[in-house]
Amino acid sequence: MAARGDGAAAARRFAVSAARLLQDWKAAHTRAVAYLEALGMPEGEREALAARAVERAVEGTGDAVAATLDAVRALVGEGRATGDADEFRAWRLERALAGRAPRSETAGRPSTSPMRDGVLCSAPPLARRSMVSEPMDPRFLRGFFSRRRAPAAAPADHALYGRPLRQLRRRLPWTHAAHRRRLLLLALVLIPTTVASGFMVNVLPNHGTTWLELAIVAFFGALFGWISIGFWTALLGFLTLVRRRDRFAITSLGQSPGEPAAALDPGLRTAIVMPICAEPVDRVFAGLRAIHRSLERAGALHLFHFFVLSDTADAGAAVKEEEAWFEWCRAVDGFDRIFYRRRKVRLERKSGNVADFCRRWGMRYRYMIMLDADSVMAGETLVRLVELMERHADVGMIQTAPTAVSRRSLFARVQQFASRIYGPMFAAGLHFWQLGDGQYWGHNTIIRVQPFMDHCALPRLPGREPLGGEILSHDFVEAALMGRAGWTLWLAYDLGGSYEEVPPTLLEEMRRDRRWCQGNLQHLRLLFTEGLFGAHRALFLNGALSYVSALLWFTFLSLSTVEAIQFAIREPEYFPHGPSLFPEWPVWRPEWAYSLLAVIGMLLFFPKALSILLIALKRRHARAYGGVVRLTVSVLLEILLSSLLAPIRMVFHSRFVLLNLLGRTVAWRSQERGDDETGWREAIRQHGLDSLWASAWGATLFWLNPYYFWWVTPIIGALILAVPLSAYTSRVSFGERTRRWGLFLIPEESAPPAELGDLGAFLTAARQRAARLPEREHDGFVRAAVDPYVNALHRALLGPRRALRATIRAARRALLDRALAEGPEVLAARERRILLQDPDATDALHAAVWEIPERERAARWGRPGQVAQSP
């Protein structure tokens, strides 16, 4: 009986063991089928391959699922030995290149392969050269007035001209015209400012005899001079555009009317460089593909190479960038001219990224065209920029005047309308007095690479941030350094086909300005750097004043409020200088104040009227803005909205300047490129305190001095309405409604150029593809772990394996085990980055994710072919 019982128990154990074994092999077969489906194998071949893999795995020992997947990897190569991980990765890449991977955009293997000796090449061969920063020593008076002491010209400068460029440029015809024009601008600003300040003295009750009133007059004079610069710049720009041709415009300088441009050397190469950092991947590559297609239409694609230089820290976002680059290259057969690099050490933000490109590949290119993440440029414009650089060997940079486009919120549409209406006039005015001492805005610019490498490496400023350390607003400084070496810089105000985007909301604009403010204030420390030209010193000062002027306005309002309250509550002193037969009567002169107000209104709004006139002179052009009537209504509404937003910007900018002066720095994050709207909670959090403060200010003035209260009511009212203004202007629905009404139209909306049409088409297609993906696959980290082709691409870009200490390897293995046990969501951004920067960890992650047996754990990764855990 005992023996019979033992036999029955053994039979049951055998049956249970056999059932478990059968279930394990069924699970292995199911997983093999799912993996073959992920590899894109034809449906008819999956079952046969899975069965063969199971048979091969039965012969071995160990985990059935792992053994079966190893067998799958060895079988899918169609006779090729792909059991080795490197060979299997190469097989996956070859299939992806041939368009046989799931979700591939096109089929057909490209004629040029990025594989070199089994390694995926995403960049051209290195051509290293150093970039060393030149001294930027401050010399107060000597540095300001002297031009004699300057850095020695680079050897290339002497080879071109036989003498230093700084000496040569003084003999160019435009330099004398620039000197006269700048003296004219100085006189046009200083003389009216002096007269207006005298008027202001007579407006005040004590006629400037108190320290408070002297301070009010001083701040008023500074503000009046500041807005005068804008007025005269716009007026000179209007006159330049009315004449239709400036003999000193870089687009016509040294060229006879009707003279055709010289043919470009077919061997000439220009790099189109886009540095990015955590930018929307769809928008970045849609813009680049639109530029690529435009160059193709222009027949000039062979003259340009594209570089995407990523500083993205987030591992998932970086994987999406790699996918987008690979799909673009494969779709257009562009692996030999479209390159991608992601820095592992992200030093000095954008300027460091560009400098890294120059040190690695700058010697391969004569020119580089710098783009922002939201830039789009027409192929004809890019070719024209290269032609101009070839024609003028003394030019170091040519900056285009980008047009703001492609926004939908009310705030952004008003901003891009204002930019399109007033921008050409102001750009022409800037050109009028800058000429060859122009500025660089950091994007949509062509740069001569060798002098940029010779002179534009940036040093660190002494001291701590925010006013010391790394130079943030690097573009103005790089332009000044290139100018110091004698190279000329031009603003091509009359060259179209250059586009950018504006922030979608007021708060996003303020976040951007917070960063720019910190960078521009650093320029005050560079104002007296030895060897700089006066025009670039003026640009440094202008950049700082664009934010400091807000603090000047705020201080002027505060002092005026103190004066008004003091006048209301203090008894006047009729004999301030002792006994006298004639008392001194404190008298306000409202008629003089009204005159000043009218003059200030003319300075602010007359250029807007000139813009309408400039467009109305061309009836066909006016139709692109909805006609003269709608154009005029749009300008009036823009004036109203900008007047309401100006006090809000004033408070923010004043706060930024004060925080920087107090040593508070700011985190430098990427600009919002989408159409995100401002919620009410966020608007209250950002504007609520300002509205309360404005309410208290207004109530105090209304109680103590009602007459002065009505003078500042527009400012107080705008601050009180800051919350609804910020929220409502961010609404896309309001922006679309104004577009249907024909308001704030720009020509790029009425008749979009081909580049913007391509941008919209590529962006729509990318978003549609993303919408078809399962929710879990929107995470780039998960896709790199689960998708065989994404994993192969990312692993190939990491390069060869690295030797690591045993402790580091063990820590990463523990991190991998935790991710497999608890799911990807438990990992912090830094931990994800560690796993995806390690080649071995990336391989192990992919293999281990597909070997997870439990349904719940596998579901966290969104992996197909999930099976229940064995009992």
Image (cartoon, rainbow, N blue to C red):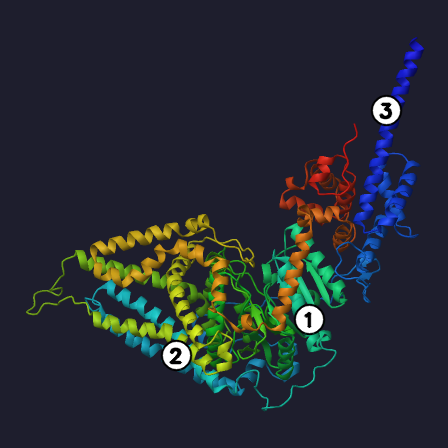
Which of the 4 image quadrants contains residue 285? bottom right
Mark 1 is on which residue type? Arg
Label 3: few (<14), some or many (≥20) within 10 Å? Answer: few
Instruction: Identify the mark nearer the N-term, 3 or 2.
Output: 3
Q: Is residue 552 left or right of residue 772?
A: left
Name above or below for residue 74 compared with residue 237. Answer: above
Image position, residue 208 (x, y; %): 22, 68
Residue closest to the far left: 581
Residue nearest the observer in this picture, 192 or 94: 94
- Name the mark on residue 16: 3
Image point (84%, 42%), residue name = 69
Mark 3 or 1: in front is 3
Q: Nearer the viewer, mark 2 or mark 1?
A: 1
Three-letter amino acid code at disc 3? Val
Question: At which x and y percent is residue 608?
Answer: 41, 74
Q: Secondary structure at mark 1?
A: helix
**Residue indicated by mark 1:** 293
For the N terminus, the image quarter is top right
Q: Is residue 520 left or right of residue 814?
A: left
Q: Residue at x 32, y 66 (%)?
A: 219
In the drawing, what numbered circle is on residue 859? none
The one nearer the camera, 276 or 12, is: 12
Q: Earlier in the sequence, mark 2 or mark 1?
A: 2
**Label 3 to label 2: alpha-carbon separation:** 97 Å
Taking the image as shown, residue 123 lies to the left or right of residue 521, namely right
- Label 2 belongs to which residue? 186
The picture places residue 688, in percent across and down from the top left corner, at 39, 50
| 554 left or right of 84 in image | left
All told, the count of numbered labels is 3
Quarter assignment of residue 397: bottom right
